[in-house]
Amino acid sequence: MLNEFNQVINYIEEHLTDDLSLAEISRYAGVSDYHFRTIFYYLSGYTLSEYIKKRKLSEAGLDLLHGEKVTDVALKYGYQSVDGFTRAFKKWSGLLPSEVIKKGTSKVFPKISFALTIRGGIDMEFRIEEKPAFNLVGVSKCVHMQFRGINQEIVKLAESITDAQKAEMHALQNLEPYEIVNASYEADANFLREEGYLTHLIGVLTTKEQVSDRLEKVPVAAGTWAVFPNEGPFPSTLQETMAKIYSEWLPSSGYEVINAPVFSFTKMDKEKKAYAYSEVWIPVRKLA
């Protein structure tokens, strides 16, 4: 897949002055839009739209150094007005376009390329499971996106669960992993940036449809799940596993991630402080 990603980078370079849509780029890559944007972020550290914007502004700066007029450069890279281009260029480079022309200096954001890097030779255990359609049932809350550390809003959500809610979840639970799970979905930034909000649900998996108004029900279509067991200090091991899934496993797995709830469960070790066994369940499908 890394070779395909580098081909996409070349495609973007050839069309920097065109009105590039993210959907068009994903079609060229031959994978779903959601999967491509997700893997691109975890490999590069940039969202696809951020990368394209930075590359356009970088090339615009070079054009200004080569004597092209600000108006022509702004239109060339898709800006509707000189003012809009000037604001974007100033925010990115710290310089006004006129300063680039006057001082003969600009900022550069080079084209990226992807290469396989061996990072410590750590094996990633996983298994593939097929699941029928089911419901995630539990209590949910809109919380701030947080990649590291313990999210206190989720802690408060867990503490708010009543005995009646717990009893109903236990009665409804009838599908693996037969554990209380933490599921995340409806993220403002599609899980690609540590900003905005997402919906977090604490609950169980069930094929039952009758649920009281004490609990939220989220339907999930039948599909394939990649499951990643992990064990170690909590929550850092769980969060590092999540990052490795997207940056190391998915690019070479032959699977693509789909836009459905990701969930995990954690069993704390009673003998070791802040130590746990966890599993991360990622919804995927085979690449064509």
Image (cartoon, rainbow, N blue to C red):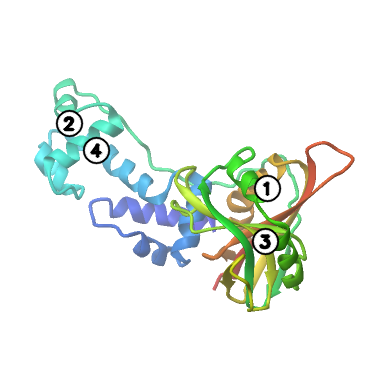
Q: Earlier in the sequence, mark 4 or mark 2?
A: 4
Image quarter in which the N terminus is found: bottom right
Give 44 or 223, whichever is nearer the viewer.
223
Q: Position of residue 6 (x, y in %)?
A: 46, 53
- Amino acid type at image mark 3: Gly
Image quadrant holding the C terminus, namely bottom right
Q: Earlier in the sequence, mark 4 or mark 1?
A: 4
The label shown at residue 203 is 3
Task: Name the residue located 71 percent from the left edge and 43 percent from the top edge.
Answer: 237
Q: Is residue 265 above or below residue 237?
A: below
Mark 4 to mark 2: distance in Å? Answer: 10 Å
Classify mark 4: helix, strand or loop.
Answer: helix
The label shown at residue 159 is 1
**Number of numbered discs:** 4
Local packing at callout 1 (Cα closer than 10 Å; few below 14, some 14-19, many 20+) is few
Q: Residue at x 57, y 72 (%)?
A: 219
Q: Which mark is residue 97?
A: 2
- Does the CB distance between marks 4 and 2 fall below 8 Å? no
- Label 1 residue SS: helix
Q: Earlier in the sequence, mark 2 or mark 3?
A: 2
Task: Give the number of the mark in front: 4 or 3.
Answer: 3
Residue type (three-letter) at the residue carrying disc 2: Pro
Q: Nearer the viewer, residue 90 or 11?
A: 90
Image point (50%, 55%), residue name: 38
Labelled disc at residue 88: 4
Of pointers 1 and 3, the one earlier in the residue sequence: 1
